[in-house]
Amino acid sequence: MTSVIHGCDFVAGWGSGICGLVVGHPFDTVKVWKQTLPENSSATRVMITLLKHESVRGFYKGMMFPLLTAGALNALYFGVYGNMMRELHLLRGVSPTTGWDGAPYHNWHWDVFFSGCTGGLASVFVSCPVELVKTQLQTQTREPNILTKRVHQYHGPWDCLMDQYRYMGIRGCYRGIVPMLWRDVGASGLYMSVYAHASQLLPDKQVWCIMIAGAAAGVVSWSVVVPLDVVKTRIQADSKSNPKYKSMLDCIIKSYKHDGIKVFFRGFGVVTLRALPVNAVTFVGYEFLISFCS
């Protein structure tokens, strides 16, 4: 039997994940604050307040844990995606390619989407604890009543993760996994589909072509899931001892009653702005590493 496990996908995913994280984490911190505040504060106000009270370091709070895991998460996502595509190529009698952008064939679109969804599903079970810790660390402050009433509670990612585990067991480490599944699985399929189709329209493997295709994939896939991201963030930023939200549905209902439909689009501008450089850099890194590796 022909093996379709291809290690280059994992290696390239690892490197590109770290590149994307370094570029995007400050945007992510601003987004998390906007989505968890009781009132709708502008991104400018959030940035000024963070700079005033937390300095530049405030934009990189909660980055250590994602930095340690971003490579592994992207390696898992791109590795599962690439190898699923090769498996589907073999099942359809299509010659396996190094990446996902070989010549289109019948049902190519569905194969790309399904493989992307599979990669997203696999990565959620690893990324959920990471995002929980990141969100908890991003929303704690040195002083009370700065944007929120939460004060410094954890000394680092491991302290935060262990506290969640001690209080609620393994379930505590997976708070917010339901909205994450709704957010990430379909969006991951859309993400790869947009990139694959954009790559066909921009066939030259020049850096600017890859950046445009990657940026387009990021903006489109994130734009459609911002409401789910708001719900996920609110649940993960919630108090573990006295939670405001009992479930995903409860969070949706309470958020709507308090702030109306507009609450589900908080951080939309920051999310889409962040998606441009992050995904452009991610795919440039991926394409470079996979061509170098193979």
Image: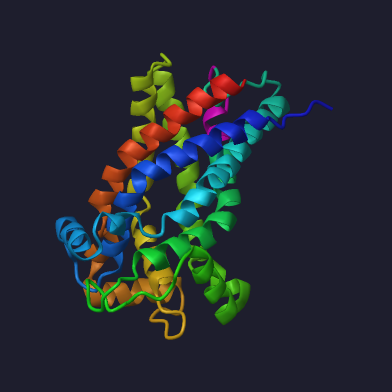
Q: Would residue 203 appear left or right of 172 to someone viewing this image?
A: left
User: Foreground residue, 65 or 219?
Assistant: 65
Q: Position of residue 226 (x, y in %)?
A: 34, 55
Q: Residue 117: in sight, yes or no?
A: no
Residue furthest to the bottom in view is 242
Pinpoint residue 194: horizontal percent, then vertical percent.
42, 33
Q: Is residue 239 visible?
A: yes
Which residue lies at the image location 20% right of the left edge and 57% below the top edge?
Answer: 47
Q: Quadrant of residue 260?
A: bottom left
In the rendered image, residue 292 lying in the magenta stretch gets the answer: no
Compared with residue 162, is residue 177 higher up or lower down, i.e. above or below?
above
| Between 278 and 180, the one nearer to me in the picture | 278
- Residue drawn at (59%, 57%) of the image: 125
Which segment did they paint magenta? Answer: 103-112
Query: For the N terminus, which image quadrant?
Result: top right
Residue drawn at x 49%, y 30% is 286
Residue for point 50% across, 47% down: 70
Q: How many marks?
A: 0
43 versus 89 height, above or below: below
Is 14 placed above or below 92 here?
A: below
Q: State yes or no: residue 107 in magenta.
A: yes
